[in-house]
Image (spheres, rainbow, N blue to C red):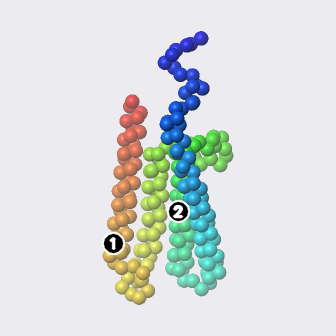
Amino acid sequence: MDHNPEKPSAARSAVLRPLPALIFSSRWLQLPLYLGLIVAQCVYVFLFLKELVHLVMHAGEFSEMQIMLVVLGLIDVVMISNLLVMVIVGGYETFVSRLNLQGHPDQPEWLSHVNAGILKVKLAMAIIGISSIHLLRTFIEAGYVGTARSTYTETGIILQTVIHSVFILSAIGIAYVDRMSSQAEHHH
């Protein structure tokens, strides 16, 4: 029998002292936040269905451009909803508790190797996708700038483009730092 005093037993190491136990348990304070995001997801499902019904009911009256703008709005809602799922599932798995989905046929492929760095990169990519949809909607309506029909100004369009570019540069920076961190971990 191995009675190495430096090697704590599994039962003893599972029990934490009071302060570390309190600190470790504090992760459960995030649970209401994730539940709140699930409620927000429900609101987005309602918004999607409302816009879809609006599109179907007025499809005969809308111009092609109006249909395209509504469809882009639907895509935007879906992308934001995907972002919510990534934050809810990935964040809960990473920061609160394991979901124990191994072997489940519906387990998202990305969840098996998620960590805080990968989650940041995925979120940055989702934000770029959402920003791209908004920018595309802006560019579609850019022809009306300067008319009463426009909701955009030239300055607004330029600022949206600059902000989108900053999102892209930020995502590249996050991905680069994550890659450097991963390579440094593999070398140690």
Near mark 1 (Cα within 10 A), the count class, few <14, some 14-19 or many ≥20, is few
If you read the primary sequence from the N terminus, does the residue marked by circle 2 or circle 1 appear first? 2
Query: Mark number for residue 80?
Result: 2
Distance from disc 2 to disc 1, alpha carbons, whole Å, reads 23 Å
x then y, percent, for residue 67: 55, 78
Tell me: 107 left or right of 135: right
Tell me: 2 left or right of 133: right
x then y, percent, for residue 118: 47, 46
x then y, percent, for residue 174: 38, 50
Query: Mark number for residue 158?
Result: 1
Q: Residue at x 44, y 65 (%)?
A: 131
For residue 44, say whether it is visible: yes
x then y, percent, for residue 103: 66, 41
Q: Residue furthest bottom?
A: 148
On screen, residue 105 above or below 187: below
Q: Amino acid at mark 1?
A: Ile
Q: Residue at x 45, y 60 (%)?
A: 127
Query: Mark number for residue 102?
Result: none
